Image: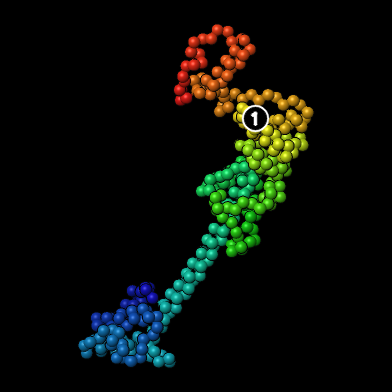
Amino acid sequence: MNYFELYPGDYLRDTSRLSLADHGAYLRLMLAYYAEESPLPEALAELYVIAGAVTTADRAAVRKVAERYFPVANDGLRRNPRVDAEIGKAQGRMAGGGERRIARKNNEAERQARTRARRTMLFEDLRNAGVMPHGMSSMAELKALHVTHVTGAEAVTHRALSSVTEGVPSRAVAGVNTGIQAPEPTSTPETSVHALQQPEGVTEALRACELMRRAGCVGVHPRHAGLRAAIAEGVTAEVLRDVAVEASSRSPPIRHPFAWAIQAARHRHAGRVIPPHTPPTGGHHAPSRPGSADYVAEQRQHYEQRIARGSAGTRRAGAIDVEYSTGA
């Protein structure tokens, strides 16, 4: 034992008739008893060595203390009932502490395994939705993305996470905790276990987003209102994919192919003519700012078209040829 509990009141009561030398002998023998966690030997010569008794007075103190406080027991060893009780209590605490440490270690391993499995589920569902989060994203960030792009409801995401490792021992839980390390899902979006748990209609939206993303369409979003409406009208994921291929191959390229492909697919499905592609106004979709390189190119193109139609009129000096800074 590295330490033991000393009760001064009990000690002084039990040793009130000991001299200063007797106290020294008692403490040396008791410390050896606690340090070895075993009774003292019967032979006085060995006790002299343990206590460091050299003089006749020291040996007399050791002999007095040994006979009174460390009597020989039936097993031939000198025992002290109080010391034996304290050693038993300490060993029980240490054994219990070891069990608690093992339990905490097992609980932590299970917690980490569940976290890895849940992160794997979140990454898989987000990949199926066309979203690639950073590999070091926190669980809170992944849950928020999952609610936004997959389930649309925090309660649904919570139920899905709770059911991932339910009833599965920690040693059987597989998975990784980053998007970079996580393996690609082996099931297709329409048959994914997690996809089947989503609200009605989301499964087809996930599949459409995956096909459109593979076709080169960027910014896919399974909760897009137009996409949900298109699926409800009977537009298939394959049709949306084909229109997305058309959008990516147009020249000049369509600025927002995802929204355009959905609108075009809905018009074709309803037998209507696809409206011409015009960049939307306002927000980050606003036309090029005056003075930017894109604005100059657009104005030059319009000017050349008017020249070709013979309706340009008189050209104003410097209207097009002036150099603009792209940072204006």
Q: Residue furthest front?
A: 308
- Find disc 1 in the rendering and name its residue: 250
Would you say 71 lies left or right of 259 here? Answer: left
Above/below status of 6 relative to 158: below
Q: Does the image show residue 18?
A: no
Q: Give coordinates of residue 28: x percent, y percent.
A: 30, 81
Colouring used for the render: rainbow
Q: Secondary structure at mark 1?
A: loop
Above/below status of 68 relative to 277: below
- Determine which quarter of the picture holds residue 325: top left
> Quick one: label 1, few (<14), some, or many (20+) residues within 10 Å?
few
Q: Give coordinates of residue 194: x percent, y percent.
A: 67, 50
Would you say 136 lies left or right of 34 here? Answer: right
Q: Give coordinates of residue 198: x percent, y percent.
A: 69, 46
- Determine which quarter of the picture holds residue 61: bottom left
Q: Quadrant of the N terminus?
A: bottom left
Would you say 323 lies left or right of 189 here? Answer: left
Which is more toward the observer, 203 or 160? 203
Kind of residue sitting beneath label 1: Arg
Which is more toward the observer, 233 or 63? 233
Residue drawn at (69%, 38%), measured in percent from left and top? 241
Residue drawn at (61%, 37%), measured in percent from left and top? 218
Q: How many marks?
A: 1
Q: Residue furthest top?
A: 314
Q: Does the image show residue 191?
A: yes
Q: Give coordinates of residue 243: x percent, y percent.
A: 70, 34
Residue drawn at (46%, 19%), measured in percent from left and top? 323
Would you say 200 lies left or right of 310 here? Answer: right
Residue drawn at (37%, 73%), measured in percent from left and top? 3
Q: Residue furthest right?
A: 271
